Image (cartoon, rainbow, N blue to C red):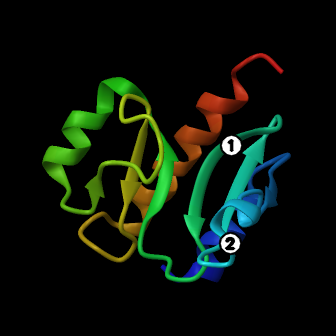
Amino acid sequence: MNIEDFRNFCLSLPDVTEATPFEKFSKGKFTILVFYVNRHMFCYFNIDDFENITIKCDASKIAELKERYQAVSEPFNGDRRYWISVKPNDDLPDDNLKELVRQSYEIVKSKKK
């Protein structure tokens, strides 16, 4: 999956917005694109390399995902108890990646506004 296809998928979910809120912290070294629902992030990645996508995850599934897929690892700058990083175009099929993003979206959307 390429970066534009992934971005379009995220934006196809209802009420999703995107922003680059961390630019002032990175001092131009990288640009993190964040996807939000109800003003809370559910997914983000570095636009400049698209090597890892950080996704909120059901805590009970993290160990199994890491064991099953080489593409799933520790999150980039996120709490390891609730976030994972996924390498796109590795051993996790695109449909499974989309499902993880949908689940992340649902986890965040279900929280109180």
Residue drawn at x 60%, y 75% is 30
| Left or right, residue 1 beside residue 72 | right
Instruction: State which quarter of the image contains the C terminus.
Output: top right
Above or below, 99 relative to 50: above
Quickly name the residue at label 2: 27
Instruction: Tell me which label, 1 or 2, sits earlier in the chain.
Output: 2
Viewed as shown, does residue 61 lie left or right of 46? Answer: left
Is residue 110 toward the left or the right of residue 15 in the image?
Answer: left
- In this view, the residue in front, 105 or 51, is 51
Name the residue beneath numbered marker 1.
41
Mark 2 belongs to which amino acid?
Lys
The percent coordinates of residue 17 (x first, y second) are 83, 54
Please tell me in which quadrant of the rendered image residue 7 appears. bottom right
Secondary element type, mark 2: loop
Q: Tell me where residue 12 appears, x and y as whole percent.
A: 76, 60
Q: Residue at x 82, y 38 (%)?
A: 39
Residue 55 spot, x, y in % from top left: 50, 48
Looking at numbered disc 1 in the image, what kind of residue is underneath it? Met
Q: How dense is the environment of label 2, judged by Cα within 10 Å: few (below 14), some, or many (20 and up)? A: few
Relative to 65, does residue 58 appear above or below in the rendering? above
Residue lying farthest left? 67
Question: Against 11, is 41 above or below?
Answer: above
Q: CA distance from mark 1 to mark 2?
A: 21 Å
Task: Using the image as rendered, state which of residue 27 and residue 32 is in the foreground.
Answer: 27
Residue at position x 80%, y 60% from top? 19
Residue drawn 59% across the image and 71% down it: 6
